[in-house]
Image: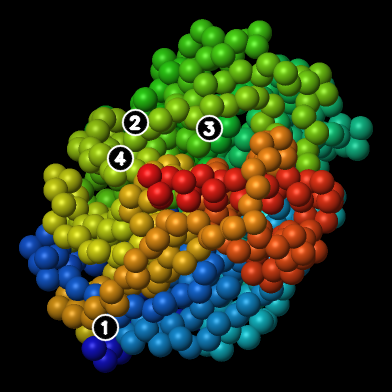
């Protein structure tokens, strides 16, 4: 194992020991902040302000990637491990589960410190929304920043892990929100939004002083109650695009993932979420564009003032929010260098915008799209296909599904090869709003998604696509073993790294898509990788393993095929280097056999009632048929449902809240009986199948 001397760097590889003012001056070059920095460190979510998920390091390249080997590994706990790690000054930082922040010596894999914000205990009923793990953290001026599930933004001392400050970011009137996205830090400020899966929220982002946590500005993404006045002219403008009493359901528009920053223009870019409810008929009387839902919004970094917006899906009614990562680049278009913003949006179109003005430069489908035929470049609006809005209760088939053709798992852009690399989900859905109270809309609850429509997901496939953003066409496409797969990183070594659900971590040729290297990780690899280096030239590649959000798209048959146990899977940190020779322990066999239950007596009526209760309360974490997704256990193999007393202590009384299992205090005795019956029935089905 190598002994390595490291050099510290700020967000774009600025030299160690520089003052904050010096670092900011060094960041003033557009080319430097985009991708020309030395790449020694990876201090932010996408490495640079431009969020390209690209490393300029090239020691590991197409010629020698076959010699890449495991340098060290580190076993983690059962918490979700889908986070984007960061690396600064020889230390690897990452968060698992509910923002459990780790600092690890990057050369040896030794744990230096671990900070537990105890977010699960503080989150209360918000835990009902699902066990989404932290997607990322940030570094700035010797501090680590993380958002917690219960809504805090915390700053930790990067050397010791000591808490320096903590602020509650949620509005006092906010609904059941949470934070899973990575904070972004720029110009001495840290910015954060929030997420929500059940509605009742008005979206916003807040900027804080990175040194002391003092709030500097806040920008709301949708207008509030007009009777109370508007915070600014942007909200007054946006209110004209809404109808009815939208504010009573919050409106939506949460900024839970996509953000980027251009230091040259001091513009912050936000990708805003869907509306509340998703269906415009239940949200805004089926009228208006509903700004700034499903939009890319540019704000002045210093003040939070509105500068421009581009609405990706006007009047969205399909959950086509542009929350996939926003990436900045300089592209030569029609013989002229343009400063652009790119996104492979959920709605299936790849957008290229002028990042200074918001002008739409091009937009073409990168996946199957049936809701619109094209994007009109003159108006910037989609040309919707007839019937796409499922009128009059009619069922229509729409592509992509509400999961999106590209979700939160980041793509990458290589400024060397000039291609974007997109983890694509090819899946459609059948939609209608029969039986929905469209007049008042579905009332948000603390644990149930209320989209305002009925949706059936169709069978789909997954792919990794290399996309030319200038020509707006695919260069190569690789079909993947499952619908959803890991985040992507590209490097100056002309390599593209991505993990897949079948348990492999792969390196592909950035130019041809040929697989050049593969490592058996023994468990799904969802997290986006990173690469960083030491002053002696050694390049490392690190990725975390384990299931995470969007795992619900993995079919039960694939879980068994690939031997995935969502609870006991081997969640690890894997770090690779040329000539690495470390080995993983032999994997323990996974037995998909249910716990023995000699006292079980079938009761179809009770099981059916329990199935409905399970779908409303439990399926987000424990998946369909109770098989488990993300970090929740397969309940068919759990002994807890066998004991009514133990089951009540865990489910209703919250005995395992510290482990991320929320308390469902409102469940009645009858509902608990039905839940137990449903779970035990599914376990019996598994036993019967194993005997056949």
Tag 4 and tag 2, C-beta contact below 8 Å: no
Residue at x 30% of width, y 36% of height: 469
* Residue to which mark 3 is pinned: 402
| Badge nearest the viewer, 2 or 1 | 2
| Badge nearest the viewer, 3 or 2 | 3
What is the secondary structure assignment of the residue under circle 2?
loop
What is the secondary structure assignment of the residue under circle 4?
strand
Circle number at residue 463: 4
* Residue to which mark 1 is pinned: 535
Q: CA distance from mark 1 to mark 3?
A: 45 Å
In-front residue for pair 642/159: 642
Q: CA distance from mark 2 to mark 1?
A: 40 Å
| Badge nearest the viewer, 4 or 1 | 4
Circle number at residue 366: 2
What is the secondary structure assignment of the residue under circle 3?
loop
Circle number at residue 318: none
On screen, residue 152 above or below 616: below
For this view, does 113 lie left or right of residue 221? left
Residue 517: percent from left, percent from top: 16, 60
**Mark 2 or mark 3, which is nearer the start of the sequence?**
2
For this view, does 448 lie left or right of residue 544? right
Number of numbered labels in the structure image? 4
């Amino acid at each position: 194992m190598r002994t390595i001397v490291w050099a510290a760097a700020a967000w774009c590889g600025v030299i160690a020991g520089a003052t904050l003012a010096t670092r900011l001056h060094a960041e003033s070059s557009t080319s430097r902040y985009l991708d020309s920095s030395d790449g020694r460190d990876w201090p932010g979510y996408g490495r640079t302000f431009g969020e390209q998920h690209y490393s300029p390091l090239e020691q590991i390249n197409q010629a020698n990637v076959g010699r890449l080997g495991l340098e060290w590994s580190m076993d983690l706990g059962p918490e979700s491990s889908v986070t984007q790690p960061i690396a600064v000054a020889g230390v690897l930082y990452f968060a698992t589960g509910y923002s459990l922040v780790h600092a690890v010596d990057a050369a040896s894999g030794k744990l230096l410190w671990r900070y537990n914000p105890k977010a699960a205990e503080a989150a209360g009923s918000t835990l009902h929304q699902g066990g989404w793990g932290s997607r990322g953290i940030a570094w700035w001026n010797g501090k680590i920043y993380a958002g917690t599930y219960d809504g805090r933004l915390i700053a930790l001392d990067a050397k010791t892990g000591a808490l320096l400050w903590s602020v509650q970011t949620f509005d006092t009137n906010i609904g059941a929100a949470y934070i899973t996205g990575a904070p972004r830090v720029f110009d001495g400020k840290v910015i954060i939004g929030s997420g929500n899966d059940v509605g009742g929220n008005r979206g916003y982002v807040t900027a804080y002083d990175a040194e002391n946590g003092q709030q500097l500005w806040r920008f709301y993404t949708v207008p509030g109650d007009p009777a109370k006045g508007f915070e600014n002219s942007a909200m007054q403008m946006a209110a004209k695009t809404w109808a009815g009493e939208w504010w009573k359901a919050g409106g939506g528009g949460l900024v839970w993932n996509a953000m980027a920053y251009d230091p040259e223009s001091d513009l912050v870019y936000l990708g805003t979420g869907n509306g509340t409810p998703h269906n415009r008929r239940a949200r805004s009387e089926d009228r208006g564009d509903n700004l700034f839902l499903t939009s890319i919004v540019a704000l002045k970094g210093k003040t939070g003032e509105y500068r421009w917006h581009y609405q990706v899906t006007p009047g969205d009614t399909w959950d086509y929010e542009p929350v996939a990562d926003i990436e900045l680049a300089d592209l030569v278009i029609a013989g002229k260098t343009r400063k652009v913003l790119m996104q492979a949006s959920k709605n299936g179109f790849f957008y290229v915008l002028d990042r200074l003005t918001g002008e739409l430069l091009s937009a073409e489908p990168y996946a199957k799209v049936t809701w619109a035929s094209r994007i009109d470049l003159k108006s910037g609006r989609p040309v919707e296909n007839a019937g796409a809005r499922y009128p009059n209760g009619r069922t229509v088939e729409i592509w992509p599904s509400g999961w999106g053709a590209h979700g939160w798992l980041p793509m990458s852009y290589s400024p060397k090869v000039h291609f974007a690399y997109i983890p694509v989900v090819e899946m459609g859905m059948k939609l209608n709003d029969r039986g929905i109270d469209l007049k008042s809309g579905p009332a948000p609850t603390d644990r149930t998604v209320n989209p305002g429509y009925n949706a059936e997901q169709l069978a789909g496939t997954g792919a990794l696509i290399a996309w030319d953003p200038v020509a707006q066409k695919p260069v190569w496409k690789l079909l993947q073993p499952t619908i959803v797969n890991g985040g992507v990183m590209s490097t100056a070594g002309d390599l593209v790294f991505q993990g897949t659900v079948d348990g492999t971590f792969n390196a592909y040729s950035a130019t041809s898509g040929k697989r050049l290297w593969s490592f058996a990780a023994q468990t799904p690899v969802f997290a986006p990788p990173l690469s960083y280096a030491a002053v002696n030239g050694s390049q490392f590649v690190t990725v975390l393993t384990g299931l995470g959000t969007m795992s619900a798209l993995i079919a039960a048959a694939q879980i068994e095929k690939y031997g995935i146990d969502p609870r006991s899977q081997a969640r690890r940190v894997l770090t690779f280097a040329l000539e690495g020779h470390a080995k993983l322990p032999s994997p323990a066999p996974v037995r998909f056999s249910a716990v023995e239950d000699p006292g079980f007596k079938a009761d179809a009526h009770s099981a059916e009632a329990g199935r409905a209760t399970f779908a409303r309360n439990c399926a987000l974490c424990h998946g369909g048929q109770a098989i488990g997704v993300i970090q929740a256990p397969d309940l068919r193999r759990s002994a807890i449902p066998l004991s009514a007393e133990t089951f009540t202590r865990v489910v209703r009384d919250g005995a395992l809240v510290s482990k991320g299992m929320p308390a469902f205090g409102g469940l009645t005795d009858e509902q608990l009986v039905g839940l137990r019956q449903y779970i035990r029935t599914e376990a019996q089905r598994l036993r019967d199948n194993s005997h056949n």
